[in-house]
Image (cartoon, rainbow, N blue to C red):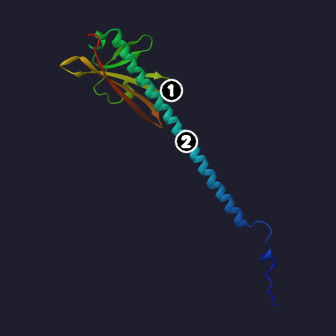
Amino acid sequence: MKKRLPVFLNNKSGISLVEILLSVGILLVIGTVIINVGSSTLLSSNTNRNRTRALYYTQQAIEQVRLIRDANSQDIFTMYGYYNLDSSVPQLVAVTITHPPANPVSTAFLIDPDGFYRMIEINDYNVSDPTRKIIMVTTAYRDKNDYKTVTASTYLTDWQQ
């Protein structure tokens, strides 16, 4: 003789509450992962964009210093210390700060309304060789509640001498 299960245990139609909760839980986990990946991608994109802009401003300053050197090499080879570019004319403006600066943001000049700061340092490459200078440009920018810096340097020679 066959035993029959009670009707509520034998009912195969529909979805049980456990299956519904499990499905909702899996969908929530997948949704959370998608949101986290999207937000980290946006943060990474913003960080890369700011770094690229800082590199651009740094390279721009190096090129401007080269143009100043090419226009009048005597000016650049008598300079020493910290400078900023005058945006109206390609000219370096001396800055009086301590060496080395304790905080590049407080001593540099704002060059962009989004919070990019730039400072140019001109030093002798070798004291015995006045025809060579080392140019160091530092650009600072705000990124994730902190300031990051990008620094590039180049050597300039008095090739017109």
Direction from residue 45 to residue 4 in the image, left or right: right
Q: Position of residue 15 (x, y in %)?
A: 76, 65
Q: 82 or 58: which is nearer to us?
A: 58
**Residue lying furthest left in this view?**
128
User: Is 3 placed above or below 151 here?
Assistant: below
Q: Amino acid at mark 1?
A: Asp
Give the camera-side residue of 90 and 110: 90
Q: CA distance from mark 1 to mark 2?
A: 21 Å
**Viewer-proximal residue among 17 and 12:** 12
Residue in view at x 53 percent, y 39 percent: 43
Q: Amino acid at mark 2?
A: Thr
Q: Is residue 32 left or right of residue 82?
A: right
Residue 74: image quadrant is: top left
Q: In the picture shown, does residue 38 fall above or below 108? A: below
Q: Characterize the local packing of mark 1: few (<14), some (14-19) or many (20 or more) Cα atoms within 10 angstroms.
A: few
Residue located beneath label 2 in the image? 41
Measured as percent of width and height from the top left, residue 12 is found at 79, 71
- Seen from the viewer's position, the closer of residues 76 and 29 is 76
Residue 19's spot in the image, x, y percent?
Answer: 70, 65
Name above or below for residue 93 compared with residue 57: above
Q: Secondary structure at mark 2?
A: helix
Q: Is residue 30 above or below residue 49?
A: below
Query: Which is in the foreground here, disc 1 or disc 2?
Result: 2
What residue do we see at 73% from left, 66% from top?
A: 17
Label of residue 114 in the image: 1
Tag 1 secondary structure: loop
Q: Image point 37% across, 29% down: which residue?
A: 151
Residue 79 percent location from the top left of the image: 28, 15
First along the sequence among labels 1 and 2: 2
What is the quadrant of the N terminus in the image?
bottom right
